[in-house]
Image (cartoon, rainbow, N blue to C red):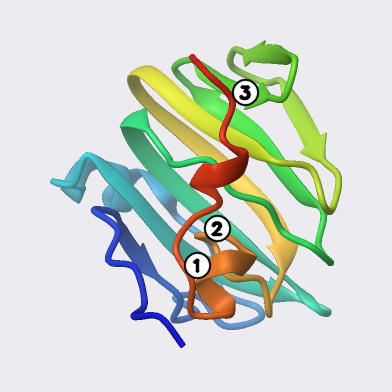
């Protein structure tokens, strides 16, 4: 089995807000010092809502069994798929279906919300299996 891949992202999987608590994003956004930051906010049934504060690009990856929903609060967020790219602005969202290879980018500091199953591995299922990201399937930029 290969070594787990280290990624340059700050990903926090702990649930920050319990049920019946007010979810306040602004203090988290203001305090963020990371280029690519994910924080799990709360759990809703079998899913979680995550905050992303980011600028730059994520690696190509896929989630074999899980859909992923992205909603832009502020900034610009690009989702690269094989064969096309989708650009989202504030108050726009997009679902990446399970099994679809994708990469996300934020050309400017952006704030997004993500909804996904609580068991999802944010870096993709290659990380779950102990392998690197699927660079062998990566498209040419």
The answer to whether residue 47 is above or below residue 46 is above
Q: Please report whichever mark, 1 or 3, sits nearer to the chain's N-terminal start.
A: 1
Q: Is label 2 or label 3 in front?
A: 3
Q: Please report whichever mark, 2 or 1, sits nearer to the chain's N-terminal start.
A: 1
The answer to whether residue 62 is above or below residue 91 is below
Q: Mark on residue 25?
A: none
**Which residue is depicted at the point 40% across and 26% down?**
110
Figure quadrant of residue 50: bottom right
Tell me how far mark 1 sits from mark 3, CA to CA.
23 Å
Circles 2, 1 touching at the beta carbon (< 8 Å): yes
The secondary structure type at the circle numbered 2 is: strand
The x and y percentages for residue 82 are: 72, 24
Question: Where does label 1 land, which residue?
Answer: 40
The secondary structure type at the circle numbered 3 is: strand
Question: Where does label 3 land, which residue?
Answer: 80
Q: Mark on residue 50?
A: 2
Q: Is label 1 or label 3 in front?
A: 3
The x and y percentages for residue 71 are: 66, 34
The x and y percentages for residue 131 are: 49, 71
**Which residue is depicted at the point 50% across and 67% down?**
40
* Horizontal side, residue 130 vs residue 121: left or right: left
């Amino acid at each position: 089995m290969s070594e787990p891949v280290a990624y340059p992202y700050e990903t926090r999987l702990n649930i920050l807000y319990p049920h019946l608590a007010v979810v306040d994003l602004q203090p988290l956004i203001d305090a963020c010092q990371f280029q690519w930051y994910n924080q799990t906010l709360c759990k809703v049934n079998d899913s979680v809502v995550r905050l992303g504060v980011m600028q730059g690009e994520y690696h190509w990856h896929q989630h074999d069994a899980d859909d992923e929903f992205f909603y832009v609060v502020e900034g610009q967020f690009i989702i690269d798929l094989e064969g096309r790219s989708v650009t989202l602005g504030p108050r726009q969202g997009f679902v990446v279906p399970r099994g679809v290879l994708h990469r996300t980018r934020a050309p400017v500091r952006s704030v997004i919300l993500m909804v996904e199953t609580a068991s999802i591995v944010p870096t993709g299922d290659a990380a779950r299996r102990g392998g690197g990201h699927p660079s062998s399937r990566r498209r040419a930029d």
